[in-house]
Image: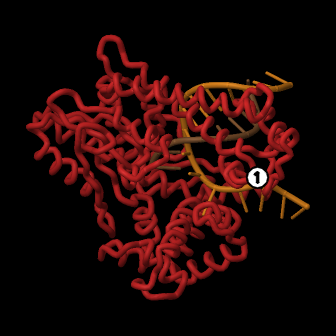
Chain colours: A red, B brown, C orange
Amino acid sequence: MNIAINQLEHDLIRVLVKIELNGVKIDVKKLTDVECQLLNRLQTTTEKITEIAGTEINLNSNEQLSTLLFETLELQPKVTSKGKSELISVDKSHLENLKDDHKIVPLILDYRKINTLLNFCTQLKEVHPKTKRLHCNLNQTGTATGRFSCSDPNLQNIPNVKLKDKESETDELKIIASKFREVFIAEKGCVLIGADYSQIELRVMAEISQDTFLLHAYNNGIDIHELTASKVFNCKISEVSEERRKIAKTINFGLIYGMSAIGLAESLTSITKKHHSTEDAEKMMSEYFSQFKGVESCLEGLVDYADHHSCSRTLFGRTRLIPELASNDMRIREKGKRLAMNSPVQGSAADIIKMAMVNCDKAILEKGLQSKIILQIHDELLFEVPENEVEIMEKLIKHEMENVVGLSIPLTIELGKGANWAVAH
DNA sequence: CGTCTCACG
DNA sequence: ACGTACGTGAGACGT
């Protein structure tokens, strides 16, 4: 048991208790309004679907849906990936490939979307009768990497939809989805302040690997995805196209996940909407690793460490057992290697924000302020701040979060504030 | 109770 | 000849 991490978790307890007791204020009127719109759309969408299908089927049953699409309506599946149940997959990504093949497909996608959004409505309506606020459970133990989880309700997976251009947006469901974070509001006389660590996991990767290029980029304010693109595609930073930056961004994400060529290819295909073969992905990866040598040897080192110790270790000493590495099954050992690469990154980031939470809470207490931490969403903290404390809190949050630990690279946050979570984020 | 799907980071 | 991105929770279905 690591003493520093043990102490950290101990110090966190009272912070978490306060967050849970505080709860968050919900604009119930707006929420009911959103729910009404969704219920209307649900009805019209369901009617259209049953009309086209000709029969009443349970749209929540993937089995019934699968037979309707691929047997009754005789659609040809583009990719026949099957789960354990031998059912042809009918999830979002697969259905999107079939969108143009039958007019029922987009309606089913709409139905699903409406259904999930309605579930969020149901969960968010559960405000406490006395406090009139919504109280979640922040589960301190239970995750493998050191993150929190959140339940009853889970406030860490509230839809986060930003409209690029409010005027020209035509997708009504998207507009409705964008309202969910507007429902989280500040108490009268208060504003919400949201503070996000920017790219904290990639910065942790820079710290762990001490990779020359990553360190240089983060110390000089260079766009990391552009840099990656210029290295992978061997071009000047100024010549990096939007498309290539997108690809580089996907590679950087994959890095943290212990990416495989197949996983990267799949992700690239769905993100760029252009087919990328496993061979393409393999080439990009080997080009990446030939450039970012520090990252390459770091990942090897992480697997090596976990192999020797049967656990991974974060920058601050949090460990995760990885029994998968001792499996006889190669697939499970491969999974273990990915865990060995990912856990120190995800876990170190969790350590950092946990320390920041303790420090923020302490600073608020010491200064005798009334501001409160309302939520933690992995790399973001949400505060409820009395109007007369806004200025001091902005400084306090920035200082505590950015200086919580000293690394070879700066940690930066993005601050936002406003009457609701949507604008504070 | 396992599986699938989908929301977030 | 295998099967792949990492971490969560919730709701629905079907056994």
Residue type, numbered disc 1: Ser
Left or right? Give the position of C8 relative to A315: right
Is residue A1 visible in this depiction of the protein? no
Q: Residue furthest bottom?
A: A235
Residues packed near mark 1 inside 10 Å, few (<14), some (14 to 19) or many (20 plus) = few
Residue closest to the far left: A388
**Numbered label tally:** 1
Residue A116 percent across, percent down from the top left = 56, 33
Residue A278 shows up from this direction: yes
Residue C1 is situated, as x and y percent measured from the top left of the image, at 91, 61
Please indicate whether residue A192 sits to the left or right of residue C10 in the image: left
The residue nearer to you, when weighing A293 against A19, is A19
A89, A251: nearer the viewer: A89
Mark 1 — residue?
A327
The residue that appears at 37% across and 38% down in the rendered structure is A181
A275 and A102: which is toward the camera: A102
- Chain ID, mark 1: A
- Disc 1, SS: loop
Residue at 10% of width from left, 34% of height from top? A368
In the displayed orientation, state which residue is furthest to the top: A130
- Asked if residue A264 is positioned above or below residue A77 in the image, the reply reads below
Above or below A394: residue A151: above
Across and down, in percent, residue A140 comes to: 44, 34
Query: Which quadrant of the view contains residue A406?
Result: bottom left
Closer-to-camera residue (A108/A418): A108
Residue A358 position, x and y percent, is: 28, 41
